[in-house]
Image (cartoon, rainbow, N blue to C red):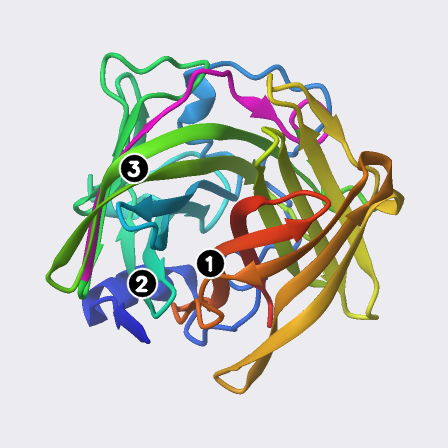
Amino acid sequence: MNDSVRISRRAFAGGLGLLGLGRVPALAQGFAGLGENAEGFAPVVPGKTFAFPADHGPHPGFRIEWWYVTANLKDSTGAAYGAQWTLFRQASRPGAQQEGWANQQIWMGHAAVTRADIHRYSEAFARGGVGQAGVETKPFQAWIDSWEMRGGEAMRAAMLAPLELTASGAGFSYTLRLDADRPLVLQGNAGYSRKSERGQASYYYSQPFFKVTGRISIGDKPAEVAGLAWMDREWSSQPLAPDQTGWDWFSLHLDSGEKLMLYRLRQKDGRADLFGNWIEPDGRSSEIASGDNTMTPTASTEIEDRKVPTGWRIVIPARGLRIETTPLNAMSWMGTSFPYWEGPISFAGSHAGLGYLELTGY
């Protein structure tokens, strides 16, 4: 079952209309023209020194960035749930930041809850410069309308924890508390994450060690939940090459304590670039070379006249890993203005655990 809250006509006109996106493509490239020329925007180059809490905040000189949380949860009966909270920022044009309604930043929020028998989601848009959405670093707060990710005075900047996370939509809401006892993890090569061999890249770090408690309500039935969460922070001006059509992305919590971030970027000619990081229980992170792993679809689901690969086999010989993934709910389709599949998964084989899968460009 899919329920959504559609953005208002005014928000749509004030958001996508101001972006010049009168016709919204259903592709990964859609929201921010991810594969378009990035002239005038700040470049992503190797060797960045990350600074916290400053880098938890927005980087308006870059075209696109996001604050992205996914959580694998269970209630007291053992029933599994998933929760997603995402805030995107896009600059519609480069240059000095304008004041008020002239500000060129567009904000988009997505929230979702998933259970084996249901998937509900909501979407919101806001214009920068008027206080409807934004991110502040001291104390940390990210918000769009009433959805909030709040750190408070007690937040430890090097861990981005603890956090309070709230969102609601048609027939669902959640309030979650996230805490971690290990520092943030730089993805790619010290936070420089390549997306192709042609220079596309992003700055990328994660907090994969969140432990979660809280409440999810679906309809009029609240459930106390607990589990694990993963937060991604990423920003860029051109994260895709023009011939890349979308990505298949995994964040995996292994029962052994390791974490695995893995994705492949698909090209129009059928080839794919594969990237990832293996994260030890103490937070040490190692890049996984493209040739050192395989990601193979094993099952697909028909959704809105699309064939979406919702089951996968992942093999990393150097790590002795060979697993098969299974979605909690194969119909976890985000029918938002820029549609994609996003939902909780489990996996078994040489390793077992839980995680999240995102599929764009289908």
- Which residue of the protein is positioned furthest toward the right in this rendering? 291
Residue that carries the numbered disc 1 in the rendered image:
343
| Residue 134's disc number | 3
Chain-order first, disc 1 or disc 2: 2
Comparing 127 with 222, the one in front is 222
Q: Is residue 349 left or right of residue 217?
A: right
Whole-angstrom CA distance, mark 2 to mark 3, is 21 Å
Circle 3: element type: strand
Residue that carries the numbered disc 2 in the rendered image:
121
Q: Quadrant of the N terminus?
A: bottom left
Chain-order first, disc 2 or disc 3: 2
Whole-angstrom CA distance, mark 3 to mark 1, is 25 Å
Q: Do the residues labelled 2 and 3 touch (CB within 8 Å)?
A: no
| Residue 107's disc number | none
Label 3: how many residues lie within 10 Å, few (<14), some (14-19) or many (20+)? Answer: many
> Where in the figure is residue 142, as x and y percent of width and height?
30, 34
Q: How many marks?
A: 3
Residue shown at the point (71%, 69%) measured from the top left: 298
